Image (cartoon, rainbow, N blue to C red):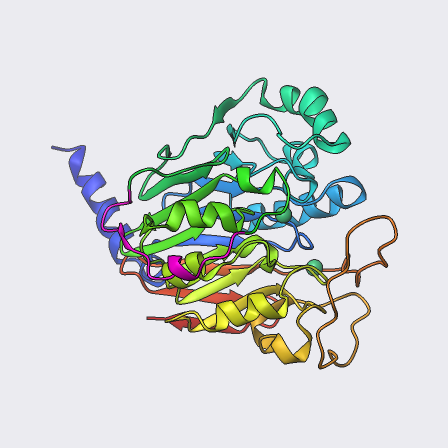
Amino acid sequence: MRQTIPAALALFTLAFSPAHAQSPKTLDVYVIDVEGGNATLFVSPSGESLLMDTGNAGAAAARDAGRIYDAVKAAGLSKIDHLIITHWHGDHFGGLAELAGKVPIAEFIDHGPNVQPGELADTFLAKTYPQLIANAKHTVAKPGDKIAMTGLQVVVVTSAGQVLKNPLPGAGKPNPYCAAYKPGDNNPEDPQSVGIHVTFGKFRTVHLGDLTRNKEFELMCPNNRLGRVDVLLGLHHGQISSNSAVAVHALHPRVAIMNDGTRKGGEPDVMKTIHSSPGLEDLWQMHFSVLSGQEYTVPGMFIANTVDDAPSALPVAPLPAVAPGPNAPPAPVHNGKAYWIKLSAQQDGSFTVTNTRNGFSKVYQ
Ligand SMILES: [Zn+2]
Ligand SMILES: [Zn+2]
């Protein structure tokens, strides 16, 4: 009895302290600028963490790992509990070794070996990755797998070219957008992406890595196995090889947060699909993209990052996409201070999105 009184008092103090009242337990998501790559950090109300991807390789690896580590520190984390490498492209695993040198990673999740041969991924998987995972848990994800995080339901919905067989609870209705679907694919590795669906109370969000149109169709047709979400994350950098209406419109997001780059994604046709998505209230972007131009971009208050040598205005017309390769002219550079977009979700399904560059914040009740 004597021992339970102080415990009860401590609980009472915790429950009624003003600090506690002002910071209700939220699911926080940090969408980090890695220049048209991916790095998305989920932090559960209990402080458990899940990072999807680690930004770019080569000269950009230290920069991107540093940007991710800034978010890790801001979230008050001392380790990454779960890391997903969605697929073996340099804009997704590139900063991993550098990040692992800064913060411990308890579990590495991937789709299995790379299916697209390439010097960067081949060497990384043969030489570096085995060392990184040697003293950690390593999981090859399958659709339907759950990633254990207290207070959240995290379900793998795609991996290694396979999609979820059975609908999520409450989902599975016929998808009316399937009839207008046009096939489209790009490379062998993007369709392998590990994608996840996250539920926190009434709040729902999904991140499908760089999953391509053909896989969107397999996942979402003839029945929508994911149902509706509040926030759609990632969007494959806003590129046209993903983002069919089959996925975007059927998911019916209130908000989309796109991990585009200065000259990667945000092309006119993608912007048309997103902006015509039923129920969409706002699109937030990691970057101004010259592929949007003023004609297709969202207002700057919804965009987290500019470029180092920022022009006073974005040209009205979008620039055509540049074929990647050694002859491609350089994209506008952003190596300076970078800003993340922070999403904070409540159990009741409401959420707040904040642009940390300009402090603009919007509550979605
Ligand atoms: Zn940037
Ligand atoms: Zn990518």
Residue 95 position, x and y percent, is 68, 39
Residue 85 position, x and y percent, is 56, 36
Q: Is residue 153 left or right of residue 111?
A: left
Is 49 drawn above or below residue 40 in the view shown? above
Q: Residue furthest right?
A: 327
Residue nearest the observer in this picture, 276 or 336: 276
Tally of numbered tags: 0
Q: Residue furthest top?
A: 134
Is 347 drawn above or below residue 219 in the view shown? below
> Majority secondary structure of the magenta segment?
loop
Residue 129 position, x and y percent, is 65, 24
**47 drawn magenta:** no
Q: Is residue 193 left or right of residue 20?
A: right
Q: Residue at x 48, y 63 (%)?
A: 256
Q: Is residue 149 left or right of residue 97?
A: left
Q: Is residue 158 left or right of residue 323?
A: left
- Quarter the C terminus occupies: bottom left
Q: Can residue 26 be seen at all in this image of the molecule?
A: no
Q: Residue furthest left?
A: 1
Q: Residue at x 48, y 45 (%)?
A: 215
- Ligand 1: image quarter: bottom right
**Residue 346 sits in which quadrant?**
bottom left
Q: Can residue 229 be seen at all in this image of the molecule?
A: yes
Residue nearest the observer in this picture, 180 or 289: 180
- Quarter the N terminus occupies: top left
Residue 185 position, x and y percent, is 58, 47
Boundaries of the magenta span: 167-183
